[in-house]
Structures are given as C-alpha cells and as structure tokens.
Image (tube, rainbow, N blue to C red):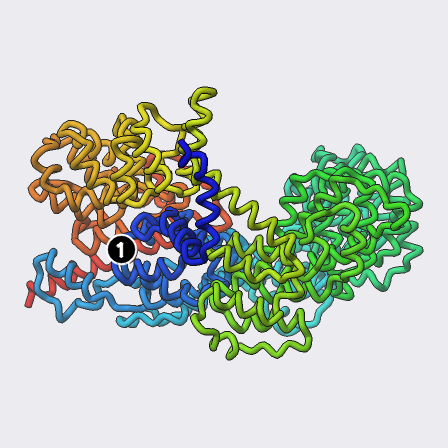
Amino acid sequence: MDIEINNDFLFFKCFRSLVIKNHIFSFLKNQNSDNSYESSISLKKLASKNRFEMILDKLKSNHFIFINHEGLRDLYLETYKFLPQYEEIYRLLWNSYKERLRRLNSLDYSIKENSIQQFKSLSKILYLELNKNNYKSSESFQNNSGIKYYSKVNRNNVIDQTYRLYSLMDLALENSTIEIAKCILDLINSITFENNRNKKKARVEISTLPTSAINNENYTKIHVLLKIQHSFTDNHIQFRQFLIDNRECSMEALIQASKKYIINSNSNTVNRELFYYFGVYLIYYYLQQNNYNQIEMLLNYSQNSSSILCINLIFYYSIFNLSIDTFNFYLSFINGPNNTNRLNKDIIFKLKNYYEEIDTSSHSIEIAKQFFNFLISDGNCGAIIIYNWFEIFKVIIVYYDSQLLEYLLIHNEKFRTMYSYYMVHYFKDMLEIHFKRNKTTKQFNNKNIEIFIQQMKSVELSKKNVDQLLKKLKTKKCIILLNHFLKNYQYNQQQPEIINEEIYSNFKNIYSFQNQFNVDQTIQLYLNLDQDSVNIFFKFKEKNPFYLNKSNILILNLIKSIIFKEYSQIVKIISTLQINSTLTTEDLNNVIGGGNKEIIGFLFLNGYLDPFDIECLLEEIFKQIDIDKQFIFDLIPSEKNQLKNQYKESFYDLITIKYHVDDISKETVKEDEDNESKSLVMLLYEGYYQKVWEYFQTNGAINKKLDVADSIYRDLPIDYFVRFYDPLIKVHLDDSDKVLEVCLYRFDILEFLWIHHLDHEQKKDLILKIFSEMNNMNCHPIIEYILKEKKQFIYNDLQLDNDHIYKLHRNALVDGDISIYQLIRSIFTSFNFQIDFSIIKEVLHFDSGTARYDVIEYLYDNNLIPNFKDIIKGQKILIREFNNRFIVPGDNSTIIVTRSMFILIYTIIRLQEQAQLNKEYYYCE
C-alpha cells in the first residue's frame, strides 16, 4: 500500500536522471504505432507523418505498403514540393505496384488539382513506360497465337502506349488545366515509337470557333468561310478568291461582295441570307449604323437560340459604348409587341460571350456616369434581372476607373442596394472581380480593393463563402487583401473600434492561410506585410502570439525545410529574417549528426531562431517532428524560465495521467466502471501499449468490447496484437466483417488469426467475404495475398461450383486488377473461362471516372479476344469528350468510352486484321 502511495514520488525522483529520462522518451517513441516499422504500412499514414525515409526503406527492401487513393493524394498533393526523394519514391512504387497504380488512375490527381510541377515529375516516369517497345507483350501474342512468324511481325503487334495520353488531354481540358494540357501534347509529340507508326505530330482540334473580337473584320471573314467551306460552286470559289485578293476589306465591302457572289440580290430574302452567312457580325454592323429597324427584322427571322445571342450582343454593346439609344432599343424589343419569338425576359447574359475589342479608358467619365445612372434608374431596373447585375458590376469594376464605382456607391441608391446584396450573397464572386486586373492597365486596382474592404464592414459575411474563397486565393491576391485589410481596420488605442466578429474571424482565416504557401510565396507575404499594422489590428483582440509577430508565418516552412533537409531554403528563410545573417548551407552540412534534433539545436544555440515567438516555434516543432522534448526544453533561454516550467509541468502531468491508469482505475472503479474502459481507450489511441499490457497483467482480461475503431487494433505492432488478443481483441472479432477490418492490410495479423482464431468454417466464411469485396479497391491487396498464400485451401476446401468460379473470374476482370485475375487463373487452371461481350461491355464502358485500359491490353496481349471486331460488332461506340461530358446512351447497344479507349479499340482491330493478313501470307508461302 505504501509503495502504491509513493508511486508518483518515485516516478518524479527517477525522472531527474537524464539517462532514465532518455530511456523513457525512447520507450515512448518506440511503442507508438506511428513509429512501429511493421505496423506502419499505410502510404497515407506514412506520407501524412512525413515518414519518407521509412517509405523508401520499405520499397527498397520489398516490404508491403498499402496504397489507395487517399495515400496517393497525400503523397502527390501535399508533400511533393518539399520532397527531394519524390521521384525515387514514385519510381519504386511503379516498379512494385504498377498494376495497382494503373488501376487507381494515379495521374488523374495531378490534373484535377492543376499541379503542373507534380505532373511533370510523374511524366518523367510515364515517359519511360510509354516510350519502351514492349517485346514481352509481343512475344506473348506470338506464343499464344500458335503462329511462328516472329521475325516478320514482332514490332507491329505491339500497342503504341501513347494512346493513353489522349484521355489525359481531355481530362486536362475538362478541368481547364491548360498548362498541363500543353505538357501532355508535348509528351505525345516527343515520344517516338520504335515501329515508326507515330511520325505525325498530334493536333488538338477545336470544333467551334468562338465569336471572338466582333469588331475585327478578320474574324468576320473566318466566320463566313466556315459557312461555305464545304461548297465548291463557281460563285463560292470566286468569293474565296475575292477574300484572298482583298485581305484588308471593310465590313461594307464584305457585304457587297457576298451579295455579288453568294447571295441572290434580287430576292426578297437578302437579309435572311446575309444573316445566315454573317450571324451576329451583321447585327454588330447595323448597331454601328444605328439601323435598329434592320436589327429588329433580323431578330424576328432568327431562331430563339440565335436571338438570345443577338440580344446579348445588343445589351453589352449599349453598356460598353455608353449608348442610351441602343439600350432603349433593347428595352423596346424585349417589352414590345414585335417580339414575335416571345423571348423570355429573364435571359441571363454572360460577359464572356461578348467579344468586342474596345478601350474604355477613352470614354469620358462624365458620360459613363450619365449612362449608368440612366441604366440603373427606377424605370429601367425592371429589365435587369438579378443575375445580370453581376455582369454590370464586372464591367464597372474591371473596365472602368474606380472613380465610377465610388461615384455610383455614393450617388445611386439602387446601385448601392444591389451592390450590398451581392456582397452578402455572392461574396466570393464579388471579391474575385475586385481583384481582377484592369483590362486597360493590366494592373490591380488598389482603390477598388480598398472600396471592397470598406464595404465588407457593412455586411454579415457567410463563413462558407469565405472558406471556399480562401482555397482559391493566389499569393498576390492574398498579400494585397491582407495589407488593405490591415490598413483599413486600424484601432484607436484609446477607443478600439468595434469590429464585426464574423469579419474578424474571416480575416484571421485569411492570415492563417499562409500555411498553404511554399517558401518563396511566404517570404513574399512576409516582406509585404507591415508589422505596425499587424500589431494594431491584433493587439486588442488576439492572445495567440502567432498573430502578433509577422515572422511567425515562416515557421511552418522552416520546420518542413528542416525535415526534408532543404538547407538552401533554411538559409533563405533565416537571411530574410536576419539581414546580417552569415548562415550558409555548408554550416548546416557540417552539423554533427545532421538529424532534425541536431539542426534545431544548432539554429537555437546560434540565435538564428530568435526572430520567432518561442511558443509558436515549439508548438510547430512538437507537431511536426518526433523529438526529445526534454532536449528542446533545455534549449529555452533562461529568461523564459516561466515558459520552460509551464511546458515541463504540462508535459509531465500528461505522462503521469497516462502512466498511472492502474491507479486511476482503482480509484474510480466504484464510481463508474466506464472510466476504466475510457482510460484504456485513451491509452490505445495515444499508443501507450506497454501501460495497457501492465494493466492486463494486474487486472486480467476485459469481458466486453471497447468502444474503439477497428483501425486501432489494425495499427498495433504484431507483438502487442498477440499480447492483447486474449484479454482484449478476441471478444471484438465476433464475425467475418470484424476480422476483415482488423487484418485488411495487415497480413501478419491475418496469419495469426488464421492459426489462433479461425476454425475451418470461419476460414471459408472469411475468404468468401473477402472475395465479395472485389469492387472495393481497398480490399485488393488482401485478395491478392489470400490468392497467393491460401491457394491450396481455396482449391481443396472452398469447393466452389462453376457459377461461383465464373463470377470470381468475371469480377476480377471488371472490378479487380490484372494480378488478381492471373492468380485466380493459376488456381482454377482447368476451368474454361470464356470472355463474352457482357464482360467486354463492362470493361469498355466509362464509369465513375475509371477506364480499364489495363484489362483490354491484357486480353489482347494474351490472345483472349482473337477477333475483337466480331465481339463488338453492331455496337455503337461514343467518345466521351471533354466538351461533351453528359452523353446519355440511346439504347443498350451504345457504349460510352474515353477517347483513349476508342483509340485502343480500333488499334487492336487494325493490328488483328494485319496479323490475319500476315498469317494468310505466311501460309501462302
């Protein structure tokens, strides 16, 4: 009893010994699941915890790593910019898990996230994969076909792998990642396939030419030429020759020439024919002449869709040319009896559909004020629906000087009301247009940004809209916004301004958003922020020291640079903060030990970390790095003793609480038995497995399930899983679902349970359960493992009927990956599995962003679809293009495929037809 009472006293007495202390910290590190080598197999967890050295070691030593979409996302999208080993890791992943990476469509992530640097890194490995001549596949084709004419057709039977790039191109265009699309096009054109079938450069064709620069006659000529491109009458040939001979002709000359060559000028349908050839360009021509009668007649001729484009042109022409007459015509046509097409008054106009080259800087600001006051007057506002107001704001803010915006906000009540409405309901869009560069000067309009920030004071902002905005802010915009915000929200020290709490919270989010920036971007932000403004803004409302010192925004990038040994980045950050710094990369390379601990100690002791607030620095160090906390405490300067003691006390209290669960449970068991379970759960989540084991040794097994996730048991090091099996885990594993969750990608745990937990029937149930999860890609690794290691059991004990074996093959092709299918074939070698059209259709059909090129290639290479043309005969195949994403098939015979799949299908058909010709030629000889 006395020993138990003095537990805490002895603990802290021992803790004064540096040797014992280091052993305790080492012990804590070793027992935590995040640091256990054998249980750390999830790529997601390893990448998110910055365990890149462990990833490399596992890949080099052929240890299993579990790869899924989330793991790839963490590896690709968060860490690649800090990681020198990135390309080596991906190369090793590709070598070991090629089929799985193909199945996961790993390249898609970089395109969807518009990560050009990441795509370029991946494409280096992709280039090698696509550019090689796959002799192995060719040999496979020859051997399976039973024809010995290898020397004649060897290279010609291999599929040119560049076909895969075309759907990546579509994806890039669909996601508007134009820079990546250019990179893909360069990649296509740079790869030379050894059989010389890829001699021609690829082209990306644009199916429709936008109505660009409507006041440019050259575009008018292109528009007319497109209308007559398939006509070869004498008149049309003469008209083309006229255009060649008169390259600088005016719109008037074009109209006269068309009347001479391609339009019957004696007909009463001249205007209709002119409108057919010239479209909206003719409307623009008549607008310049103020010929509204002709325009109205043409609009009544045209179809509804054409009329909408023309009305859009008239609406914006009036705005950009400050034409009150044109706007009155727009109103009269929309509201008048001559609107024979009964156009909907609620037409939504889009500024992006108006393409006039016009310099608004030449307009008189007084005329602009007069026009917009007229436009927004009570009598006219009814013709402007709510959605079109945004387009009007865009014209005023982006195309005119801020003087116009300021004037309307002060003098036009209707404009001010609608502006406030949009600030509240369309905050993200309004911020975007205030941050657009002026179309004439190509510069940010600082005055517009100041106006925007001033207007933010008067509205209640939606946090959801602001959060969405922050994800899209670019560095320059963030810097401008921060500086303007700080300057416009300065406090009077005697009478602090009462700031809207929602705005204050949102600004803090923007300020904290810097953690998304790389080193150069964060340095740019640091240099542009005014420290006095930062102090004035935050000092009355913020206790967190992070916000009071602008140097703190560089802490995260500094710690990451230490982790990844980016010494040049460390020097860059320190030199920014300390102008007279003499730190060099050579100094860091010469640090004895060279680990995170040693580098941090060197920077601490030489004063390089003095510009940071030490609380913020310690918090980030402890968050990002597994490090001896006592070592860091000892580095805290003596003048910070209070802080040092505060950290020590909180840390030691944490140790005491977690290391004395046996004492806690004894004291509380009479009050509430659940406290005991909660304490154990806490210890398991935190990774203090030794204390859990000590508890079981003292108190025995728990005869009930703990409220703990399956993943906690799955993350246990195998030695602790074995120890905890009887007292804790056994009762949890009461069905095959639980067993599967616990051993999902822990094959060492599966083997233990196979021997110690599962009886014969349970083993059968578990395997059948695993096979039923073929459509779950997270289960593919354990399916593959079961097929490899339990081959005899599957064949001898499961006693599957033919229908079940067929479904197993089918599901492996449709939902699994090639390695799984090959393993199933190796078990059921005598089963006659036929590839029918129903399987082919499922594999070909583009579904949920997945295209199974790997399956079709495998079937071709192994001669499992010897006459592909006959299999898909009579089927309609539609390409899902980037600008036609919402195809709805008309009937069951229609298959929607990606562009790359379409190319692959007809490549295989062509190759098989050529092979058949070669076969006939061989027999003829």
Which quarter of the figure is the N terminus placed in? top left
Decide if residue 72 is on the left or right side of residue 356: left
Identify the image quadrant of residue 55: bottom left
Q: Quick one: which residue is furthest to the front in this view?
A: 2
Q: Position of residue 286 (x, y in %)?
A: 78, 53
Q: Work out whether residue 211 or residue 659 is closer to the camera in this orientation and state it.
A: 659
SS for dot 1: loop
Q: Is residue 580 left or right of residue 711?
A: right
Towards the viewer: 76 or 857:
76
Q: Amino acid at mark 1?
A: His
Residue highlighted by disc 1: 63
Residue 899 in view in this figure: no
Q: Is residue 275 above or below residue 500?
A: below
Closest to the observer, 570 or 834: 570
Q: Tell me where residue 545 appears, x and y as whole percent.
A: 69, 53
Q: Residue 235 placed where, x, y %?
A: 58, 62
